[in-house]
Image (cartoon, grey):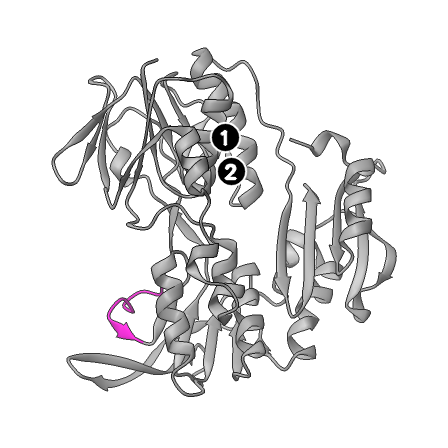
């Protein structure tokens, strides 16, 4: 291969560039990203950056020396509109294209939004640096009442940050016990209890019916969230954290299988051997992994298989994910089921510091979870989940 195009400038795209160079590729490497900003890290956007403890210059995924070492040609602010697999090119919105005999799809996803809210002032999602900039400004305009729709990790992190800023926060979630489908009831309860312990109001089993708005300039401004029971929660700022939609529309007609992402085998290879997919957009062996760690795990394997022209190695996802909430580090590794047995091996969930082990019916460890104890978590992850390592 002489030229490889990486479409997507987030962590999955950058890790793919590093992996390709690390595997010996010395040809032309072009990274196409629709974001105008140089590649940056997203985890701090809901935490240190949002609160103001981190500046934009600390978010970069590559410094000048690293970028030079990669000999990476960047096309920023360029949106890919079509993959012409037969012609070997990626077509861009400005009418130009990138000719390439290998393609890495790393276009990630976009934040889901509440229907009919795109033009409502005060309603935010948090996916990009520009999203975080806008939300940070809104949180500093007086002392806004914040309502967060969705009690997953992103929603919980934003709630934690807002409470650290002294703001009034309400979190809405449709589940009776948020996080239970992923962590099981016992561990989920320990996580959810952090909200009440730090003054955040959590309303589970809550349906959002719409928004209460008032005229503002030529548009509307949110003043509350209307619930399914007819009540309204007052809000000056609404943050929607209800997941993402994979960015695959530009690939329609390309010959790739698209089903809640770009379908690949376990080696991140699509139906076209010179096209691989990584990161949030990739649906590897029937499953998408929307975790920061997964991007690096997948990129290493995808690069090897792309250069080899076939699937020679496969990804063994570690399942590692972390979150920082209310001064606690939450960590999960492995692939536990919500129905697995849970053993507390240190601490106690109601004390806000504990480590738990998940086991299946055969007594095999399927996952390890920790709150506020990264050292013991790391040891158990290494000894109990050796096969989960990338």
User: Mark 1 and 2 residues: CB-CB less than 8 Å, in contact?
Assistant: yes
For mark 1, give the secondary structure: helix
Which residue does the image show at 37% across and 41% down from the upper left? Answer: 9
Which residue does the image show at 44% across and 22% down from the upper left? Answer: 269
Q: Which mark is residue 295?
A: 2
Which residue does the image show at 45% across and 84% down from the upper left? Answer: 145
Q: Which residue is mark 1?
A: 299
Q: Residue furthest left?
A: 95
Q: Is residue 261 left or right of residue 349?
A: left
Check if residue 117 falls in the magenta segment: yes
Determine if residue 41 is in view. yes
Q: Which residues are magenta?
A: 113-121
For mark 2, give the secondary structure: helix
Can you tell which quarter of the image residue 69 is in?
Answer: top left
Q: What whole-number distance in Å separates the C-alpha atoms at marks 1 and 2?
A: 6 Å
Q: Residues within 10 Å of mark 2 (few under 14, many from 20)?
A: many
The percent position of residue 67, horizontal first and vertical second, equals 41, 36
The percent position of residue 115, horizontal first and vertical second, equals 31, 65
């Amino acid at each position: 291969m002489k030229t490889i195009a990486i479409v997507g400038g987030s962590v999955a795209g950058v890790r793919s560039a590093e992996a390709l160079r690390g595997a010996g590729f010395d040809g032309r490497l072009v990274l196409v990203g629709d974001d105008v900003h140089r590649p940056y890290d997203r985890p701090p956007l809901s935490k240190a950056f949002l609160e103001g403890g981190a500046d934009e210059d600390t978010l970069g995924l590559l410094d000048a020396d690293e970028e030079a070492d990669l000999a990476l040609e960047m096309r920023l602010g360029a949106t890919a509109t079509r993959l012409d697999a037969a012609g070997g090119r990626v077509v861009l919105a400005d009418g130009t294209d990138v000719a390439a005999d290998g393609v890495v799809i790393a276009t990630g996803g976009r934040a889901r939004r509440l229907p009919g809210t795109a033009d409502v002032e005060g309603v935010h999602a948090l996916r990009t640096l520009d999203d975080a900039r806008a939300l940070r400004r809104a949180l500093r305009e007086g002392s806004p009442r914040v309502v967060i729709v969705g009690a997953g990790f992103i929603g919980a992190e934003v709630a934690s940050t807002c409470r650290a800023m002294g703001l009034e926060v309400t979190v809405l979630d449709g589940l009776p016990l948020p996080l239970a489908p992923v962590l099981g009831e016992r561990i989920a309860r320990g996580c959810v209890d952090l909200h009440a312990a730090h003054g955040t109001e959590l309303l589970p089993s809550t349906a959002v019916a719409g928004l209460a708005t008032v005229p503002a300039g030529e548009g509307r401004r949110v003043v509350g969230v209307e619930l399914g029971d007819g009540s309204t929660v007052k809000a000056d700022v609404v943050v929607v954290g209800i997941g993402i939609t994979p960015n695959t529309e530009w690939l329609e007609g390309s010959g790739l299988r698209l089903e809640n992402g770009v379908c690949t085998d376990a080696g991140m290879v699509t139906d076209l051997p010179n096209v691989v997919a990584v990161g949030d957009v990739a649906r590897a062996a029937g499953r998408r992994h929307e975790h920061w760690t997964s991007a690096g795990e997948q990129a290493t394997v995808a690069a090897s298989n792309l250069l080899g022209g076939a699937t020679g190695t496969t990804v063994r996802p570690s399942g590692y994910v972390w979150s920082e909430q209310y001064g606690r580090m939450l960590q999960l590794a492995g692939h536990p089921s919500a129905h697995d047995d849970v053993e507390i091996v240190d601490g106690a969930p109601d004390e806000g510091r504990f480590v738990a082990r998940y086991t299946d019916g055969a007594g095999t460890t399927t996952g390890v979870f920790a709150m506020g104890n990264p050292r013991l978590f790391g040891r158990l992850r290494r000894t109990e989940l050796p096969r989960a390592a990338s």
